[in-house]
Amino acid sequence: MRVLRRGDAGPEVAEIRSMLAALDLLPNGDASDGNGFFDAAVEHAVRAFQQRRGLITDGIVGPATYRALRGSSYHLGSRPLAYLVSSPVHGDDVFALQERLTELGYDAGRPDGGFGPQTEGALRNFQRDYGLVVDGICGPSTVRALRQLSPRARGGRPVFLREQEQVRRAGPRLRGKRIVIDPGHGGADSGVVVAGLREADIAWDLARRLEGRMKATGMEALISRGPTHSPSETDRARFANDAGADLFLSLHNDGNRSPYAQGVASFHFGTGNGTTSTVGELLAGYIQRELAARTGMLDCRTHPKTWEIFTRTRCPAVRVEIGYLTNPDDRRRLSDPAFRDVVAEGILVAVKRLYLLGENDQPTGTFTFADVLAHELAKAE
Ligand SMILES: [Zn+2]
């Protein structure tokens, strides 16, 4: 294209006047008079536009300014967007798409209004996460999904909002839900060992107690390892992913050089600066509350972590560190089978609370296994 500046005239200038008028940078009637003069008012409007767009503010319409002006007539949804290698698409709609994807936690690169391979990659990830057709094309259904998310997207990444939506859609019943219980360590890896008590064995025993209760409610409980195996964190995550697990629960005990360190703590995926698995955090919270209330152990709270087990599992995952084997009080509790039953019941109730989505006002610590079973039966009718 011809570079246009003050003093030029012709149909190209008329087009620029019309685009500037559409942006309210020139008086509206001005565009239609067709005189096509690049006068001082046009130059002023071009400068204002350039400034707004972070372009070089020279009042001259070169290729970059022209492309930005053309692109400004598009808004998200006004045309389908895709990555065209031969002639990349530019426009405000692309910019809006990039901003939206970035906001939602997808790496679309620096928003620049040009639909490149990185935008396509981010768009495909978004489509995959939301169960849309993964074609890398921003068409009507993708735009609808992007719009629908906007009011709820505040305060959380939609990948995780989708988790929440799945929990809501799954309904309050436990029956049919698939849980992977992951007893920590195992085999040659004993975990923390104090006075003959091995973390791997306690975790295995807790897993079996929890498995029994879950199966009684109709859940599909799977254990991530055999009694004497120690898969890697990656293998445990793969097991859960292959099983299509709804939730992943990792059971551990803690240890510390100080015998005073004690209590129960729950962990979920989170970066610590706002990005968090909302369902993971919710479930960790329920588990933490139930266990602290039922067991009398010190409440060491919930914590966001980016551990491998959380980044590799595709479903919401929680890891619970149930007591310190290095603490005499916690150790005494953990060696008691009745106490392990209390822990298993507390975790089961926490999972039930997750699916009830807060629709149960029974105080923390008072909801029993029998209540859960009764609730399941009542829902089945
Ligand atoms: Zn451990």
Image (cartoon, rainbow, N blue to C red):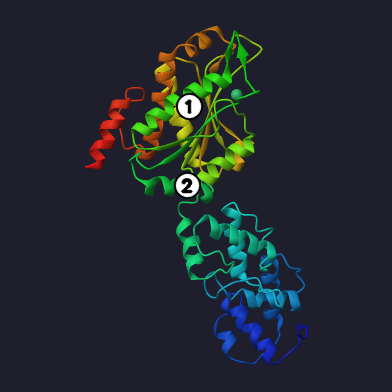
Question: What is the number of callouts on the image?
Answer: 2
Q: Is mark 1 within 8 Å of ligand 1?
A: no
Residue 272 place in picture, x, y as percent: 60, 36
Query: Ligand 1 sits in which quadrant?
Result: top right
- Residue in the picture at 55% in, 81% down: 28
Residue type indicated by callout 2: Glu
Disc 2 is placed on an element classified as helix
Determine contact: label 1, label 2, CB under 8 Å: no
Circle 1 or circle 2, nearest the eye: 1
- Residue in the picture at 39% in, 32% down: 214
Left or right, 41 with reference to 245:
right
Q: Is residue 222 visible?
A: yes
Quadrant where the image shows the C terminus: top left
Residue 45 place in picture, x, y as percent: 66, 75
Dot label at residue 207:
1
The image shows residue 185, relative to residue 96, as above or below, that is above
- Residue in the picture at 52% in, 12% down: 330
Residue 234 place in picture, x, y as percent: 63, 39
Residue 244 place in picture, x, y as percent: 49, 46
The image shows residue 6, relative to residue 85, as above or below, that is below
Q: Is residue 271 visible?
A: no
Quarter assignment of residue 184: top right
Dot label at residue 163:
2
Quarter assignment of residue 368: top left
The image shows residue 102, relative to residue 272, as above or below, that is below
Residue type indicated by callout 1: Ala
Quadrant where the image shows the N terminus: bottom right
Dot label at residue 258:
none
